[in-house]
Image (tube, rainbow, N blue to C red):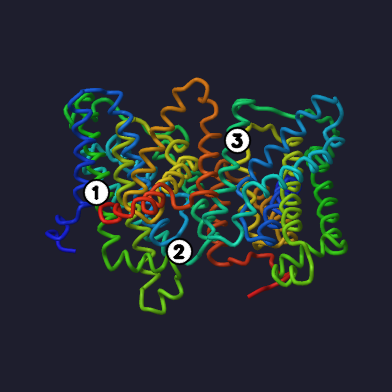
Amino acid sequence: MFEIIASIIDGILVGSVYGMAAMGLTLIWGVMNVINLTHGALIVAGMFAVFLLVQAFGVSAYVVAPATLAIGFFAGVAIYWIAVQRMIGRPPLMSLLSTFSVNMILIGLGTSLWGTVLFNVEVSLPGLTLGNYTFPGTHLMAAALTLLIAVLLYFFLQFTRQGKAIRAVSGNREAAELVGIPTRRVLAMAFGLGAALACGAGALIATMFPFTVLAGGAYQLKSFVVTVLGGLGNPAGALLGGVALGLVEGLTTPFIPVSWTSVIEFVIFIFVLIAYPRGLFNFTFRRS
Amino acid sequence: MTPLRFLRQPFFWVIVAMTAVFIAWPLATGDVRLRESLVLAAVYIILASNLNLMLGYAGYVNFGSIVFFGLGGYVGVYLISEQHWHPVAAALAAGISVSALALLFGLGILRLRGFYFALSTIGVNEGVRAFVSNFAPWGGASGLYISLDSYQSLGGPRQALWTIYILLVGVMALSLLLSFGIKRSKFGLGLRAIGQNEDAAGVLGVPTPLYKALAYSISAFLPAVAGSFYFFKSAFIQPVDAFDLGFSVEVIVTVMLGGTGTVAGPAIGAFLYEELRGWLLTSPAFSNFQLVIAGALLLAIVIFAPGGVMGWIFRHIPKMRRILE
């Protein structure tokens, strides 16, 4: 019994990081109605950023983690100017394809630079042993940092001028423009913020699990599942969705082979998408 | 449209001529490398043309259209290798069963629109892939293999490869005729109305849920048949190859490149893309950059020429509107 509870808790720790990645995806959707298909590539960019920085400076992964957020932000703004800006308000296919093509370019560059071999970031952090189950230190640290970033994001969106501008544009873009909010700059900033969250989540995942250039696809799909659970456009819901997905993973791993987990995830995904298209945890705001 | 009126359409003869070239060119030269390149081109054209029924006519972005091809391949290879069916019978069974399954899926996920539908099609493909990777009767993650004996029914392996090639070209011709026929029919008009404005189409009496589900199901049939032939030809099938999301998106690129909503566009785009890909793969300078270039090409089309090749042709040579569809 204790084993099962421990597995669930560990699942929730890891799931919160999925939630952080999904917050980035859902923030972008909420502000500009664009599904960012470069999300997976940005997660991988975060993984490699932390790997290269640790290798270059020989410091702990957690010291360079803020730098990965900054890298993600600027990469996001660049992607916005190149591929997203012109697609806002056009049919869904256009923004899906333009962000996907940037994804192909990034993944293609990554595979030609690093191939598809496994990388991992060495982190020495003592685990927490309870009974005969040890929670890895990296999982605890990742969950704690995720919580910190989620709280910071909440305060940013709720109380700063820039955050209020993002929420205003998300609510009604034309009205925001009328009252003098520079919407283009706000949209670019929101996209950068979403990308930074994806990169940061990638950096944290890199401290927990080994990764390849192609790892982004799987985590991007997890982000979709989490986002749909939380309701598209709802960052708080995304964090809860991540925790819920982690809970499902933790609950199922003691009983069935790991490879079946993704089957369950996708069944939940399709079911929630059809039955609850607004998400399971979307009680913050409702728009018609 | 009655068959006789079909014969008077110039575009019908364009399809016939193209099919004839596909069959006669490699047969006359006996060139196996040319045949292999054209097999891939035919597969791209089949997938692009059928994807276009949803993407171009009805305006629904199906990111996981490859799931039909992969499932068709699995049903076909399973029936041939484990149940010892004739390849053609297995391919037909694959087409019918996958089409029926698509109707079932379609009735569920076609209640969604726009981004939600696009996301759900990714979910369907990945879900099926995850399921098949764990499904023991279909060999799980290691897949299914076809023994050499299975090729005897088509006159031995060497003869079988040519027969399958001609069958695939036949499926390609059927795909184009289907796309053409649907575009000229009341059904196709309804689909294009849905693509323009679904609510308005519904108000004007188009049975939108039925039409969408039918289009989704029809667009599954020929890709499944083609998948069955294609994986029979490769002699093995694995979940990684059968449900490759990247391949699925490449097919979207080909439709965009040629021009969505036209009959000839997906075929032109698929052929151009396949030739470009073959050239990039064999050119040493670009072999690592294949994805980068495909991505940059897609980005350029989306930003600068959303009408694709056909959009350009129609704008600059208006007379072509009477010949091409």
Mark 2–mark 1 contact, CB under 8 Å?
Answer: no
Graded by Cα atoms within 10 Å as few (under 14), some (14 to 19) or many (20 or more), the crowding at tag 3 reads many
Is label 3 in a helix, a strand or a loop?
Answer: helix
Question: Which of the two discs, 2 and 3, sits closer to the camera?
Answer: 3
Q: Amino acid at mark 1?
A: Leu
Q: Amino acid at mark 3?
A: Ile
In three-dimensional space, the C-alpha distance between marks 1 and 3, rounded to whole angstroms, equals 36 Å
Badge number at residue A107: 3
Are both tags, 2 and 3, on one chain?
no
Q: What chain is tagged by disc 3?
A: A
Decide which of A168, A149 is in the foreground and name it.
Answer: A168
Q: What chain is tagged by disc 2?
A: B
Badge number at residue A280: none
Is label 1 in a helix, a strand or a loop?
Answer: helix
The residue that appears at 72% across and 42% down in the rendered structure is A75
Residue A8 visible, this orientation = no
Q: Residue furthest top?
A: B284
Decide which of B44, A128 is in the foreground and name it.
Answer: B44
Question: Which of the two discs, 2 and 1, sits closer to the camera?
Answer: 1
Residue picked out by circle 2: B110
Are both tags, 2 and 1, on one chain?
yes
Q: Taking B308 as reference, is B118 left or right?
A: right
The residue that appears at 52% across and 25% down in the rendered structure is B286
Q: Position of residue A108 (x, y in %)?
A: 58, 33
In three-dimensional space, the C-alpha distance between marks 2 and 1, rounded to whole angstroms, equals 26 Å
Residue B304 visible, this orientation = yes
Residue picked out by circle 1: B174
